[in-house]
Amino acid sequence: MTLLVGARVLDPGAPAGPAAVEIVDGVVTRVGPAPAEAPTGPDVRHLHGAVLTPAFVDAHVHATATGLLVDGLDLSGCPSPRALLDAVGARAAARPGALIWGHGWQEQAWDGPPPSRAELDRAAGGAPVYLSRVDVHSALVGGGLAAPGTPDGPVTSDAHHHARRVALAAVDGPARDAAQRAFLATAAARGIGVVHECAGPDISSRDDLAALLAADGPDVVGYWGEAVTTAADARDLLAATGAHGLAGDLFVDGSIGSRTAALTSPYTDAPGSCGTRYLDTGAVAAHLAACTAAGIQAGFHVIGDAAAAALADALQQAGRGGVRHRVEHLEMVDAAQIAVLAAHGVVASVQPLFDACWGGEEGMYAERLGPRSRAMNPFAALHAAGVQLALGSDSPVTPLGPWEAVRAAVDHRTPGSGLTTAQALAAHTVGGHRAAGDRSPTAGRIVPGAPASYALWDGEGGTCLRTVQRGRTLHDTLA
């Protein structure tokens, strides 16, 4: 038995306040007022001033790509093309011939275009180079990672998918396992008990997903983003991958930053482009119908308004079934499309830090889209329509940080589009379980009968002191 006494409990659906929480055999057995006389004993923790929440669920992550950055190049603050080349050169000098993996560059404030492939090759001494843009929908590559005939400059769309596959194939098993362990340890240290890995043939590999599902740490709900057309194919693919569903980053389109999100009218800063469509409405509808017939959760990566329209049309074509499907990101969606999503019970896995990083009147979204950006990420409208929200990071696109995501959801850059703190907390806990199909009334809660899955903090939004998932201690600074 464990008794946690005096912490302020933030449980979705219940008033916040100090309480005693009793845990027996990995299950919450009592939540109520603290005893009048403070109990003592080795299993009693007095936690006055601390905050207790359910363990958070990050509903969209890429574990290996994030973990590789522990030993990779962090380019998130890179101020210029020259600085990027200098960083590549320094890494190549330290590890001649080894794969150079980096992430996070953004070109908006640079004083010139991104480096050419020849410049990268010179800086790296011919070593393979994969440097993803912050949105991971384009990359600078060198050392033979680009497919023959690929134009110079950042690679996007299918050329990017090719380069990423080649780069990941150069990461051996021990390096991959170390990256996954580093990711899971970081997640646990930030109060996260469950992660939804969004894998797929254009993102990682079946071996990568299998290794992650077998790793110790936070629970992993694995998704595999590959389209099917029949129920039999859906069942076979699910069995072959060990995935929870055929969802996650099954790309209908790309991203705003790389100008590959599919738009109904051209980009403001690239009038000749409406982005990229990877799946048309028919392919989306076929995947939905096949997965529904097989009783498997389907889902898609959808960002641009043309992609949102394709999803809404496909849902109406495929019809309703007994499976609650999901959609990732859903940044440009209108009221009519929201109504369709709500009617079909679709869960929206969204990333509030996208708005915090790139929203606002002078942000990257406004630069790419003009006035259209003001309607992006309408969390309040989705919630009001009854669409279940689940919050996540899309790490490494934005960092693992549930409190940061909660704050970003509340402090939305467009007035009226944000959530309340209670709504955001629920979306980052209960919502994550709902997104994976868990309808239990105790999932993501701190109530009697719930699994002991909680995070303890030194204050609301503070440092995580302990993370426990289903009775397993994943992170502990109090021992």
Image (cartoon, rainbow, N blue to C red):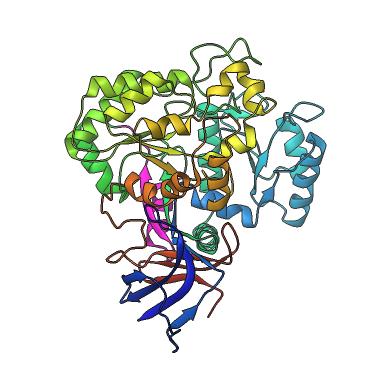
Quadrant containing the N terminus is bottom left
Q: Residue 170, can we see it? A: no
Report whether 243 appears left or right of 15: left
Is residue 269 depicted above or below 61 in this figure?
Answer: above
Q: Residue 415, can we see it? A: yes
Where, by quadrant of the figure, is residue 444 drawn? Answer: bottom left
Seen at 49% across and 42% down, the residue is: 420
Closer-to-camera residue (209/316) = 316
Seen at 43% across and 20% down, the residue is: 334
Q: Residue 219 in magenta?
A: yes
x and y, in percent, of residue 286 in the image: 26, 25
x and y, in percent, of residue 352 in the image: 53, 39
Seen at 40% across and 35% down, the residue is: 383
Residue numbers of the magenta segment:
204-227
x and y, in percent, of residue 128 in the image: 64, 44
Q: Residue 238 in magenta?
A: no
Seen at 20% across and 28% down, the residue is: 320
Where, by quadrant of the figure, is residue 147 drawn? Answer: top right
Is residue 477 depicted above or below 340 in this figure?
Answer: below
Closer-to-camera residue (282/172) = 282
